[in-house]
Image (spheres, rainbow, N blue to C red):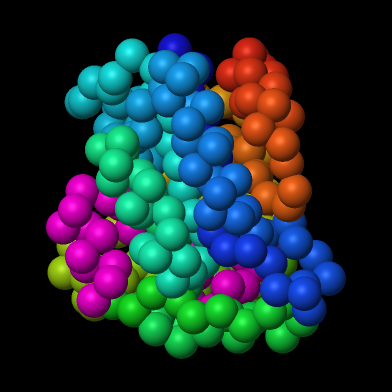
Amino acid sequence: MWIPALCYHRIEVPPHVARDDTNFVTPDMFAGQLDWMKRLGYTGVTIGQVLAWQRGVASLPTRPIAITFDDAYDSVVSQALPRLSALGWPCTVYAVSAYLGDRNRWDPSAPPARLLDAAALRAMLQAGHDVGAHTRHHRRVRGLNGDTAREELAGCREDLEQSLGAACTSFAFPYGSHDRLTVQRVRDAGYAGAVTLKRRTIRKGGDPFRLGRMSVGGPLSHALFALKLAKLQFTPSVI
Ligand SMILES: [Zn+2]
């Protein structure tokens, strides 16, 4: 079985000031994309479930798809969750632990947006969703010195575990940026797996620290989304 995973950011209509709308999917587009996934027979699962399946300790529904949200924007709860809950699908959100309840301070050029706070993330966990780590400060991990990398990686896991009272097992590389050393550092920081932005499916026996995801953002017709998803589904997974 090859499992596709999708990476979303903000489920909002992009403000006029946004020069780059690749991080935005409008609520209507998101609803249409979910509708396509449902029609194609998919069922949403979390990255935690995928990792457990890879380890052989859990089974998955017939046609699983992992829907993930990087940065943990408020719009995940206000716009995406009601639509996912209507289908009974769980998702995975990747949080930046130093900025919970704050805003996207790491990118002054992006339109500001509020980020979910610890209480909202705890409620997501209670509802069956997954919360993973995305560094403390949204740092590009590749190229960091050893001490800073440990703070950003292990530090983020510890922060989240403390504020959420639950184990934090998966990590998303900010900007998808990773290399062999970075992957080793994520492993050393105590995670069970990590997601990238490489457009490839996830398979059993593949590297749990290099799970592929397809980015979804910007204007995209439902037909083009379905085509991209079909193409991803049949992309052989080599890692
Ligand atoms: Zn991010």
Residue drawn 59% across and 19% down?
233
The answer, for residue 154, to whether it is visible in the render is: no
Most extreme residue toward the front is 28
- Establish if 114 lies above or below 146: below
- Farthest right residue in view: 19
Q: Is residue 123 magenta?
A: yes
Residue placed at 73% from the left, 41% from the top? 220
Tell me which corner region of the image, top left, top right, bottom left or bottom right, holds residue 111: bottom right
Residue 14 in the image, given as x and y percentages of width and height: 68, 67
Q: Which residue lies at the image location 63% right of the left edge and 64% below the top edge?
A: 13
* Left or right: residue 144 compared with residue 137: right
Q: Position of residue 24 (x, y in %)?
A: 65, 59
Residue placed most toward the observer, 181 or 34: 34
Q: Closest to the observer: 134 or 103?
A: 103
The answer to which of 73 and 147 lies nearer the viewer is 73
| 25 on left or right of 151 | right
Residue 114's spot in the image, x, y percent?
49, 80
Q: Is residue 42 left or right of residue 6?
A: left
Is residue 144 visible from the viewing direction of this image?
A: yes
Q: Quadrant of the C terminus?
A: top right
Q: At x 78% / y 78%, what residue is drawn?
A: 17
Magenta span: 119-142
On whether residue 134 falls in the magenta region, the answer is yes
> In the rendered view, would you say 47 is above or below 182?
above
